[in-house]
């Protein structure tokens, strides 16, 4: 598993802007530590991030999107759709039956890839089938820094704050 590319979801990505400082520090620590490594995120999870941001004012979007655009361009975040195997597992796996259809898709992909999974989502964190792949959040995460130009964009983007209820559908 150490060589496996970690899977992240929208709650983890948006966690960098979460109103809760501990959630924010946890997500930020991951992204600053993995900046020169890879992560995997499904197209649907990227879309969920956009859906959250599009509900914000144009002014906040204009402060947020430069950071997100540069991070997605510079960090090796692999984006892909779901595999046929994941679709089949999501539709038939009893261990995922308690999750919404959208969440079953990502959970099935995690099970198929057998990769570490980073999430702030309580539904995933409470799913017994995912336990072997869930990465336990650090008790006292220490966020690092992005390269200077990206760090400046991140700091400007912090004008946008995500509240816990905005992630409930994630």
Image (tube, rainbow, N blue to C red):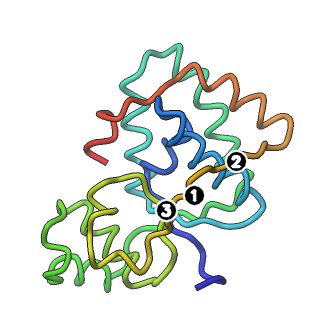
State the residue position of label 2: 142
Mark 1 surroundings within 10 Å by alpha-carbon count, few (fewer than 14), some (14 through 19), many (20 or more): few
Q: CA distance from mark 1 to mark 3?
A: 11 Å
Q: N-terminal of the two: label 1 or label 3?
A: 3
Residue 7: percent from left, percent from top: 51, 67
In the displayed structure, 43 sits above or below 25; it is: below
Q: Residue at x 41, y 52 (%)?
A: 120
Query: Residue placed farthest to the front in the image?
Result: 139
* Disc 3 to disc 2: CB gap under 8 Å: no
Q: Residue at x 54, y 34 (%)?
A: 21
State the residue position of label 1: 138
State the residue position of label 3: 118
In the displayed structure, 88 sits above or below 53; it is: below
Mark 2 surroundings within 10 Å by alpha-carbon count, few (fewer than 14), some (14 through 19), many (20 or more): some
Q: CA distance from mark 2 to mark 1?
A: 9 Å
The residue closer to the viewer here, 132 or 169, is: 132
């Amino acid at each position: 598993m150490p060589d496996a590319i970690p899977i992240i979801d929208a709650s983890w990505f948006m966690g960098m802007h979460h109103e809760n400082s501990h959630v924010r520090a946890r997500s930020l620590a991951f992204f600053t530590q993995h900046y020169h490594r890879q992560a995997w995120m499904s197209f649907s999870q990227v879309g969920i991030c956009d859906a959250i941001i599009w509900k914000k004012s144009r002014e906040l979007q204009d402060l947020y999107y430069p950071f997100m655009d540069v991070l997605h361009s510079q960090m090796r975040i692999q984006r892909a759709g779901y595999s046929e195997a994941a679709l089949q597992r999501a539709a038939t796996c009893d261990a995922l039956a308690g999750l919404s259809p959208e969440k079953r898709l990502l959970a099935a992909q995690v099970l198929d890839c057998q990769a570490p999974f980073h999430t702030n989502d309580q539904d995933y964190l409470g799913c017994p089938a995912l336990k072997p792949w869930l990465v336990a959040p650090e008790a006292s995460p220490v966020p690092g820094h992005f390269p200077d130009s990206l760090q400046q964009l991140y700091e400007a983007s912090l004008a946008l704050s995500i509240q816990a209820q905005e992630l409930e559908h994630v």
